Image (spheres, rainbow, N blue to C red):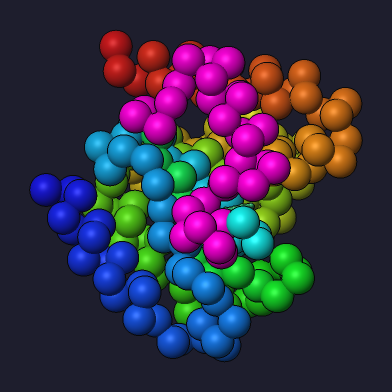
Amino acid sequence: MKETELNKIYEECKNCTACPLHQSRTNVVFGKGNPDAKILFIGEAPGQHEDEMGLPFVGASGKLLDKYLDAVDLSLDDVYIANILKCRPPNNRDPKEDEEQACIGFLRQQLEIIRPKIIVCLGRIAAYKIIKPDFKITQDHGKWFKKSDYLMTAVYHPSALLRDPRKRDDMMADFIAIKDKLAELLK
Ligand code: URA
């Protein structure tokens, strides 16, 4: 069962000391949602609230993400949400290359177990790591990319919308397109 397989990796992740971020974490933030989901959302790294609770996207940007999911009639039963880094970088700084390298194996294993149809990167950091290194979030958000078995896209990081509410219409359009793409794939 996918849940059992994910739990095995979660246990490994909890004991991970592969990069210095383990020293300052309160909890590893492994993932949440449905292991059978057809859509996998990938964020950047846990923030303070996520570190405290051990769950991704539970702070202000998580609440905004919930609103967009809700607006297109998706819930945690339909999606799985994880991050590139499983431990919080101090003061929410950007992940470092060696931290990403040390951590990305967990995400790869999650992907292989969940095997979603669609991957949605939340923000530029996930997009350049997962989709392509020259990804430009302002011009490339909402575009579709096919990589191995997966259809991938990226949307703005919810925290970018908190800073600049003018991006909210684009975000809504991207979420509607994601929902439409899912319906098309499941036909
Ligand atoms: N931002 C992220 O990228 N991930 C989280 O889990 C929370 C905020």
Residue nearest the observer in this picture, 71 or 39: 71
Which residue shows up at 11% across the image and 48% down it? 1
Residue nearest the observer in this picture, 158 or 58: 58
Q: Is residue 75 magenta?
A: yes
Residue 35: image location, x then y, percent: 28, 43
Which residue shows up at 65% across the image and 72% down it? 89
Picture quadrant where residue 62 is located: top right
Residue 85: image location, x then y, percent: 53, 66
Residue 74: image location, x then y, percent: 45, 21
- Left or right of 167, for residue 100: left
* Quarter placement of the C terminus: top left
Q: Is residue 183 magenta?
A: no
- Left or right of 92, for residue 129: left
Q: Residue furthest left?
A: 1
Regarding residue 143, the answer to whether it shows in the image is: no
Residue 97, compared with residue 73, is above or below; it is: below
Picture quadrant where residue 79 is located: top left
Residue 65: image location, x then y, percent: 61, 34
Which residue shows up at 48% across the image and 15% down it? 73
- Left or right of 136, for residue 77: left
How many marks overall? Answer: 0
- Left or right of 58, for residue 104: left
Regarding residue 108, the answer to whether it shows in the image is: yes
Residue 132, compared with residue 147, is above or below; it is: below
Residue extent of the magenta highlight: 50-78
